[in-house]
Amino acid sequence: MDLASFSSSLIRLIQVHGPWIISVVVALESAGVPLPGETILVAAALLAAATNQIDSAVVVAAAAAGAIIGDGIGYTVGRPFGMPLLRKYGRYIRLNENRLLIGRYLFFRYGNAVVCFGRFIAVLRMFAALLAGANGMPAGRFFFFNVCGGICWACLFGFGAHAVGTEIYKISETLSLVSLGLFIGAGSALSIIIRRYEIVLLRQAERALSDR
């Protein structure tokens, strides 16, 4: 499926199911299912900028709710079952031993920041909450940073994409498609950089956790 077809499919889903599909997709991604949560948020925000079919505030609220609920599910699952569950089923959500080790390392050093800002990083978004539960992060502290991170992420990507889309549609519809392509291209470039940096993180994690 090419970019245009994929974007059209997402927009049709949003038109049919409204904010519910945004919440469900984002929640499932946050709970560990490899779905395009961030992409559907951006697509919905651009749809809101181009039409009156959905309100941008509703888009942001739906995404934030999905992010918070999904991370809550991930934390709840991770708390009792912990690392054995991640090791057994992690391969289905692209979690190998190296990424689990990196996650543990980042969590031990920057636990609060991982929960709050891990949502902005593709590598961490799907399993930050699972690691929080697996590493025994206190529930009150987890949910505080979970709520803060979910709201900040939804506002930044939702209102940001809406603002960009509004300006673009004042010029032409063609330029809006170019903008969406550039936005996704920039995200792909960021993912490549993050994957390369994984090697550095892995070495640091191996040194830091070798005696644990």
Image (cartoon, helix red, strand yellow):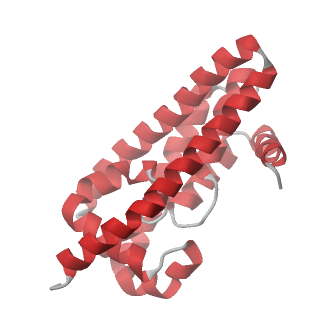
Residue 135 in view (yes/no): no
Q: Position of residue 148 (x, y in %)?
A: 34, 42
Q: Position of residue 130 (x, y in %)?
A: 40, 69
Q: Position of residue 80 (x, y in %)?
A: 35, 80
The residue at 72%/39% (across/down) is 18
Reply above or below: 103 against 178. below
Along the line of sight, the residue nearer the viewer: 126 or 191: 191
Reply above or below: 64 against 162. below
Please give left or right for residue 108 compared with residue 145 in the image.
left
Based on the displayed image, in which of its 4 quarters is residue 184 positioned? top right
The residue at 33%/76% (across/down) is 101
The residue at 47%/33% (across/down) is 156
- In the orientation shown, which residue stands out farthest toward the top? 170
Residue 113 in view (yes/no): yes
Reply above or below: 61 against 78. above
Based on the displayed image, in which of its 4 quarters is residue 35 positioned? bottom right
Along the line of sight, the residue nearer the viewer: 99 or 159: 99
Please give left or right for residue 195 compared with residue 131 in the image.
right
- In the orientation shown, which residue stands out farthest toward the left? 211
The residue at 41%/37% (across/down) is 152
Q: Quadrant of the N terminus?
A: bottom right
Please give left or right for residue 66 compared with residue 135 in the image.
right
User: Across the whole image, how many numbered discs are drawn on residues?
Assistant: 0
Q: Position of residue 105 (x, y in %)?
A: 26, 70
Q: Quadrant of the C terminus?
A: bottom left
